[in-house]
Amino acid sequence: MKFSIVTIPGDGIGPDVVREALGVLDAVATRFGHSFLVTEELMGGVALDATGEPLPAKTLAACKAADAVLLGAVGGPKWDDLPGSKRPEAGLLALRGGLKVFANLRPAKMFPQLSDASPLKPALIEGGLDVLIVRELTGGMYFGDKGRNSAGDEAWDTERYSRLEIERLVRVGFDAARGRSKKLCVVDKANVLESGRLWRETAKAMAAEWPDVELSFMYVDNCAMQLVRNPRQFDVIATSNMFGDILSDEASMVTGSIGMLASASVGAGGPGLFEPIHGSAPDIAGQDKANPLATVLSVALMLRHSLGLEKEAQAVEDAVGVTLDAGLRSADISTGAPGERLVGTREMGAAVRKAFVDQGLGAQNGRL
Ligand code: IPM
Ligand code: MG
């Protein structure tokens, strides 16, 4: 099949990791006979430098017209002192808003090979970890009214949610839980925030539609604590934009490294946006040190969620597993244990591609 993909490498390590992920996408095309028409667009700091805008209109138009968008990362110290609306991050938010991708799926799943890289005690993660964070992505405080008083010594950001915004997000959470361990935990701050009370009220009113899913609620501060105390209690967590941003960083680290976590942002049927959850890590940009696996795994999510290619997605995930089995480790997931080999971005990408191709040859020969 033919698909059009827009890539936005962005800033910092973005281009390093996107390059490797596209190499894997190439291997998918060859092995499964698909054709991916990949075009590159600017967003973030590089877009600011080239056009003065963090999200040029041309980029948004190209993304809207594509089947899916693959993003690296944006931001860096060079652009840190710009006003909020001119920061690279504003481009990312505008892209998410423009594509209307309100549901951000962040699967924090531990590869068993990486259990030693988790900072938690082995007993807490025995038997694996598989938490899906469903983060609201186009509303709440990141999009609410914000400003400064005239003296500049007071600032505000507004957390505001409508029932409709909550419903459509929580629905994604319920549906996801149905296909997994059937537990949905809605995380809010309903003991303090009015918006949190609306989240709770709305989710409760929906529960009857998913009688097979066990619905629970947790305050966000407690959830942050429970994620390190007993992460295995969670299946799906549905939460607001800001809480999901924070909790997904925490959940990712529990699985070994933020360098492993992919994300899929989807909405009401338009192109999905796929990106690693990590940032642009400007300190290691262009040095062949970044872990490309979160972006490679984002390609798998893209194949699965936007392109309907489940078999291909699974094959990419398997190839990552084989690469980790072989002991290859980027710096963020290396523990120095015997059998590990420290590798750079390029070598990791090449190893995944090779594992992917070998797997295909094995399948052809009836060995797999
Ligand atoms: C993320 C990032 C972004 C966010 C930043 C870069 C705007 O932290 O995707 O988690 O806050 O959503
Ligand atoms: Mg974040």
Image (cartoon, rainbow, N blue to C red):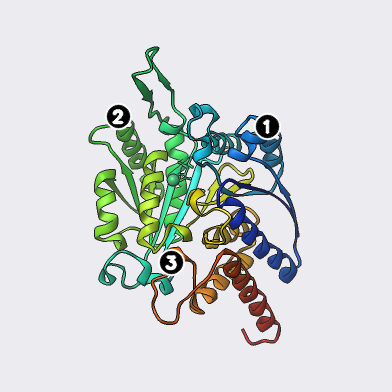
| Residue 258 placement, left or right of 289 | left
Residue at left 60%, top 73%? 351
Q: Nearer the viewer, residue 250 or 2?
A: 250
- Secondary structure under tag 3 reads helix
Contact between marks 3 and 1 (CB within 8 A): the answer is no
Q: CA distance from mark 3 to mark 2?
A: 40 Å
Disc 3 designates what residue? 333
Q: Is residue 119 left or right of residue 336?
A: left
Question: Which callout, 1 or 2, points to the residue nearer the camera?
Answer: 1
- Closest to the camera, between mark 3 and mark 2, is 3
- Sooner in the amino-acid sequence: mark 3 or mark 1: 1
Q: Residue at x 71, y 35 (%)?
A: 58
Identified by mark 2, the residue type is Glu
Q: Say what secondary structure mark 1 lies in.
A: helix
Kind of residue at badge 1: Thr
Q: Is residue 263 visible?
A: yes
Q: Is 176 rendered above or below residue 167? A: below
Q: Nearer the viewer, residue 269 or 132?
A: 132
- Mark 3 or mark 2: whose residue is earlier in sequence: 2
User: How many residues crowd around disc 1 within 10 Å: few (fewer than 14), some, or many (20 or more)?
Assistant: few
Quadrant hosting ligand 2: top left
CA gap, disc 3 and disc 1: 37 Å
x 31%, y 68%: residue: 125
* Residue found at x 47% / y 61%: 260
Q: Could you tell me residue 5's position as x and y percent?
A: 70, 51
Residue wearing tag 1: 51
Q: Which mark is residue 194?
A: 2
Q: Amino acid at mark 3?
A: Ile
- Front one among 164 and 32: 32
Residue 167 is marked as: none
Residue 189 position within the rendered picture, expressed as x and y whole percent measured from the top left:
28, 38
